[in-house]
Amino acid sequence: MSDDPNYRVPDAMRKAATRLDEAFATDEVACVYIEKLAEFLLSIAEEFGPPLPTDDPTNPNTEP
C-alpha cells in the first residue's frame, strides 16, 4: 500500500476488488452472505488502523 495518505483509500479498494475478483473467478451467479460481506468490509477498514479523525467534538478521534 502507498505511504501517501491520498492513495490509502484507493489502494485498499483495489486490494478488496482483487480479492473479490479472485473469489468470483467463475461466471456463475454467487450468493453473498451479509455476515461475510460485513467481515470483508471490516477487513478493508482495518487496512487503515484507527478511525479517521473528524471535526465532531464528541468523537474521540477528533483532531485538535
Image (tube, helix red, strand yellow):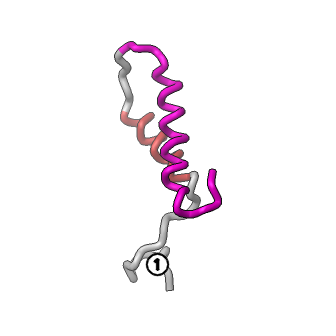
**Which quadrant would residue 41 be assigned to in this image?**
top left
Vertical side of 3 occupied by 33: above or below: above
- Give, as a single range, the part of the protein colored magenta: 1-28
| 21 in the magenta segment | yes
Q: Is residue 28 left or right of residue 44?
A: left
Q: Residue at x 54, y 49 (%)?
A: 11
Q: Residue at x 51, y 42 (%)?
A: 14
What crowding class fits label 1: few (fewer than 14 Cα within 10 Å), some (14-19), or many (20 or more)? Answer: few
Q: Residue at x 50, y 24 (%)?
A: 23
Task: Write down the residue under mark 1.
Answer: 62
Q: Which residue is nearer to you in this view: 10 or 39?
A: 10
**Which quadrant would residue 58 be assigned to in this image?**
bottom left
Q: Position of residue 29 (x, y in %)?
A: 35, 16
Q: Position of residue 6 (x, y in %)?
A: 52, 62
Q: Which residue is nearer to you in this view: 13 or 63?
A: 13
Q: Residue at x 50, y 86 (%)?
A: 64
